[in-house]
Amino acid sequence: MAMESYQSDVVIVGGGLAGLAAAFELLDQNLKVLLLERDIPEHLGGLARESFGGVMLVDTPLQRRARIADSSELALADWLRVARFSDDDHWPRRWAELYVNRSIELIYQWLTSRSVTFLPVVNWPERGMFEPHNSVPRWHIAWGTGKALVEALLHHLENHPNRARLEICFGHRVEELFVQTGMVKGCAGIREVDGSSFIASADAVLLSAGGICGGDLSRVRRHWYKPWGNPPERLLNGSHRNADGLIHDAAATVGARLTHLDRQWHYAAGIPHPRQAGKGLSLVPPRSALWLNAHGERMGPPPLVGYTDTRYLVEQICRQPGQFSWQVLNWKIAIKELAVSGCDYMTAFRDRSKLRLLRELLFGNRELVRTLLNESTELVTANSLDELVAAMNALEAEFRVDGELLKTEVKAYDAQIERGERFFTDDQLRRIASARRYRGDRLRTCRFQKIDDPQARPLIAIREQILSRKSLGGVQTDLSCRVLDNTGEPIPGLFAAGETAGFGGGGIHGVGALEGTFLGGCILTGRIAGRAINGETL
Ligand SMILES: Cc1cc2nc3c(=O)[nH]c(=O)nc-3n(C[C@H](O)[C@H](O)[C@H](O)COP(=O)(O)OP(=O)(O)OC[C@H]3O[C@@H](n4cnc5c(N)ncnc54)[C@H](O)[C@@H]3O)c2cc1C
């Protein structure tokens, strides 16, 4: 079979959000661009296409309109507290500064000028468990979720005046980079359709092939964060099936420095994806549910509550027997608070149906709960606590829920609610009270809902596993997205952006994230890389 060969000014490896952002900038400069994408055309845009479309932005008109006083200084202080950068994290820290200082200009305005709109109510995840994380709401939801965001960008890319300068080759898996006289001059790989080889030559190569958190879970386990102990046996892939680290290996082979691969952003409430074999679905854990371990014991103190500190939740669950958990709730809590991260199941957001969204906010998302109950094996229902425990034990083969223990936990929690808000000492209830003071959360959080409430039945239990989602570490770059070697020197001709580059500098987040910084980081690094390849700055 003859080897296909391509020639271009620049090769982009991977057509996710970072690769697309770079393509815009390169076309703006009239460069000839070859985008090599392993996936099929319908998946162009990568993970961003299935994302919820939440973008972390600082001091936007939407925040101002809602009288949310944000600033770069406040955001940076929050970021640094969560990141816990070490002295070695020079480039990640510089990227973090750049993000908070220029998110309006480089992310918000870029998106809105490409027809992306945001919901007026800014969300507030990651408030922190023991110290402030996001001091104020900053998570801006793209109307229509990540799907609409990607479609808007693709529409503009298709209509770019230099569109003819962009060639996109699908089903092309890049496996190696080649170097000539000390410079990266292209890459080579396999066409997935027939296994034939191809080679692509260019003056520069941009690596934007995503992270290492999905395609190969053995890699996630190999780089598991040591202080958390052993990786869970039950682990779900919540990332891209092509996020297998192949490109990281190729970069390392030509001398690139890989940093912080053990820093990964996992979620605590995953279930096997009912519609996609081998994948996980990340639930947004309801605040009013009781979070129990494999034996039915409430985890803590302090009790685990969603929207606080994702990293802490994951760490605590990983220390429990079986390293998985149960959330126990009821119909009333589920329809108000249960949500799914991503666009698949959040159809009112995805389809931009204002009417449906309003109805769901007022009367609950019955459609979602019914769908999950129908499609997933991980949700069980019952009309009494005894029945619920029996259903949980029928589902779980390895660990038994202790019925008496579970009932004691539920009764103690419900009794607090019965006594009234003035007497709350339970940390979960105090957090719920605090969340309800913010407009964006009031409608989506129950007003102190008892679990074993005959008016709120059926009771529901959800068995949840850790879901692997994002690689916080990656190929180290400087502020121009130039890939650095182990001595800190740029490797000529090689650039990296998006999740491959740890969203900037090989780990812009440090150990933890404020959320929404992943999509934002892809746009930021992709755009800057696209300019830097031609020696320009933004
Ligand atoms: C369900 C879900 C919800 C999310 N919600 C949010 C959110 O609300 N906010 C947020 O900030 N982040 C969110 N994220 C994370 C965010 O979507 C990703 O971190 C981001 O889109 C990564 O973009 P990327 O361009 O770096 O990589 P990817 O999107 O992974 O794209 C990489 C591309 O490279 C291709 N590729 C891989 N290997 C090769 C190879 N060897 N050769 C050629 N091509 C290759 C892949 O096929 C893929 O198309 C979510 C993620 C998921 C899965």
Image (spheres, rainbow, N blue to C red):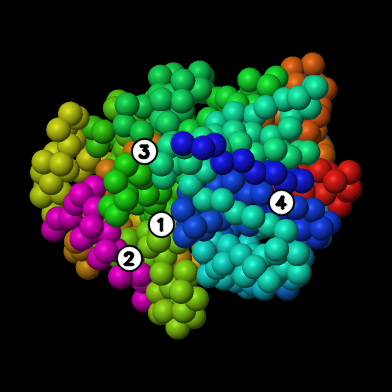
- Magenta region: which residues? 362-383
Q: Residue at x 37, y 59 (%)?
A: 338
Is any part of residue 34 visible from this angle? Answer: yes
Q: Is residue 174 above or below residue 141?
A: above
| Residues packed near mark 2 inside 10 Å, few (<14), some (14 to 19) or many (20 plus) | some
Q: Are marks 1 and 2 in contact (CB under 8 Å)?
A: yes
Q: Nearer the viewer, mark 1 or mark 4?
A: 4
The secondary element bearing badge 3 is classed as strand
Q: Is residue 515 above or below residue 263?
A: below
Q: Which residue is mark 4?
A: 33
* 110 on left or right of 390: right
Q: Residue at x 74, y 29 (%)?
A: 184
| Residues packed near mark 4 inside 10 Å, few (<14), some (14 to 19) or many (20 plus) | many
Q: Is residue 369 magenta?
A: yes
Q: CA distance from mark 1 to mark 4?
A: 36 Å
Residue 523 placement (x, y as % from top left): 69, 52
Q: Which of the 4 image quadrants contains residue 163?
A: bottom right
Residue 213 placement (x, y as % from top left): 49, 35
Some atom of ligand 1 lies within 8 Å of the CB belonging to the residue at label 4:
no
Q: CA distance from mark 1 to mark 2?
A: 9 Å
Q: Which residue is mark 3?
A: 236
Between residue 200 and residue 413, name the one nearer to us: 200
Q: Which of the 4 image quadrants contains residue 363?
A: bottom left
Q: Which residue is mark 2?
A: 368
> Mark 1 or mark 2, which has the lower sequence index?
1
> Mark 1 or mark 4, which has the lower sequence index?
4
Residue 144 placement (x, y as % from top left): 53, 70
Q: Which of the 4 image quadrants contains residue 382?
A: bottom left
